[in-house]
Image (cartoon, rainbow, N blue to C red):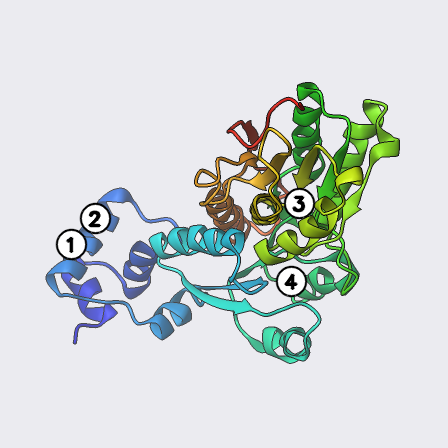
Amino acid sequence: MSKIADVAARAGVSKATASRALSGRGYVSEETRTRVADAARELAYVAHSSATSLATGRTQTVGVVMPPVDRWFFAELLAGIQDSLFALDYDLSLYGIPEGSDTRERLFESILPRRRFDGIIAVGIQPSAHELERLQRPGRPLVGVGPYSDGTSAVSIDDVAAARIATEHLIDLGHSDIAFVGGTTGAGPLSLGDELRIDGYLAALGTAGLADHARVAGSAPTLSAGYSAAVGLLADRRRRPTAVVAVCDEAAIGTIIAARRLGIAVPTELSVVGIDDHEHAELFALTTIRQSPRDQGHDAVRLLVERMDDPDLPETHLAAASALVVRSSTAAPR
């Protein structure tokens, strides 16, 4: 099996230069880089991760801490992170552990502090848990994804604006009795992202003079929970709203299914707007606020690599693009 010394001898350079040329870390002229790459290819040389780590001081591994990936948003985000890391020849260590669990506490208390990562991407960290502060202590480069980003670079959408735009769309159609599905469950603390979306909904109603009509039907951000909350909201014909803003597309789809089972026509009797542009949004003709979690994953890796190359860079907050996508789940009230 060829070694880095063989590649260096074939290319006529030192082992340190060959290592820099193959790792992409440190200055090497383009001519030398090409010569070393050609030598490595001729010798079928494959860098061993331990040797690369010794030569560069890096592990070529990034830690990713996030909620379980059983929801579309987190699965798409992880796909974007993985695509970008693999393209840069980085490995990924994933910790998808529910908030508030004993396992997650052990992760922050004993596992992460002793692992060697070149950087960490933290997804959906909540202020109440003080986890972001704990991740910052070892001094490793850190990038957050989500609305909580104090003291670190981050990628997120404007959750307040997303819900406000969704609500304003319904107001512009002529709706005045607009409810919100999602955000509060009673089973645990309200996530900051959901809280901000409720704030956007309330702000839009307040601006339109409709604050007295505000109603929040508590629901976790899932299809089944959205369905259950919507059944309770829509079952009383006398107090039934004419429109719903959902905390996410999964809750919105649950609301549409609940309406259909109750014999309520969407959109002629009930308009529904979601947030995300989930992969099934088109299937349900769902009007929604589009975001791309896969692109957010790419952006998070780019920010992290920049910080790994220059730890003194100032914090960078990227606002991911979002836009209203109008389909046929919304219409003027009858």
Which numbered disc, 1 or 4, marks the residue closer to the eye? Answer: 4
- The reply to whether residue 32 is visible in this rendering is yes
Q: What separation in Å lies between label 2 and label 3 (alpha carbons)?
A: 51 Å
Q: What separation in Å lies between label 4 and label 2 (alpha carbons)?
A: 35 Å
The residue labelled by disc 3 is 247
The foreground one among 160 and 53 is 160
Q: Dot 2, how many residues are within 10 Å of its Cα: few (below 14), some (14-19), or many (20+)?
A: some
Q: Dot 1, how many residues are within 10 Å of its Cα: few (below 14), some (14-19), or many (20+)?
A: some
Kindly check if marks 2 and 1 are in contact, taking CB atoms under 8 A apart as contact.
yes
The foreground one among 303 and 333 is 333
* First reached walking from the N terminus: tag 3 or tag 4: 4
The residue labelled by disc 2 is 34
Which numbered disc, 2 or 3, marks the residue closer to the eye? Answer: 3
Q: What separation in Å lies between label 1 and label 4 (alpha carbons)?
A: 37 Å
295 relative position to 23: left or right: right
* First reached walking from the N terminus: tag 4 or tag 2: 2
**Element type at marker 1?**
helix
Q: What separation in Å lies between label 3 and label 4 (alpha carbons)?
A: 35 Å
Identify the mark at residue 38; answer none if there is no mark.
1
**Element type at marker 2?**
helix
The residue labelled by disc 4 is 139
105 relative position to 8: left or right: right
The amino acid on which the numbered mark 3 sits, given as a three-letter code, is Val
Quarter of the image for residue 190 reads bottom right
The amino acid on which the numbered mark 4 sits, given as a three-letter code, is Gly
Quarter of the image for residue 269 reads top right
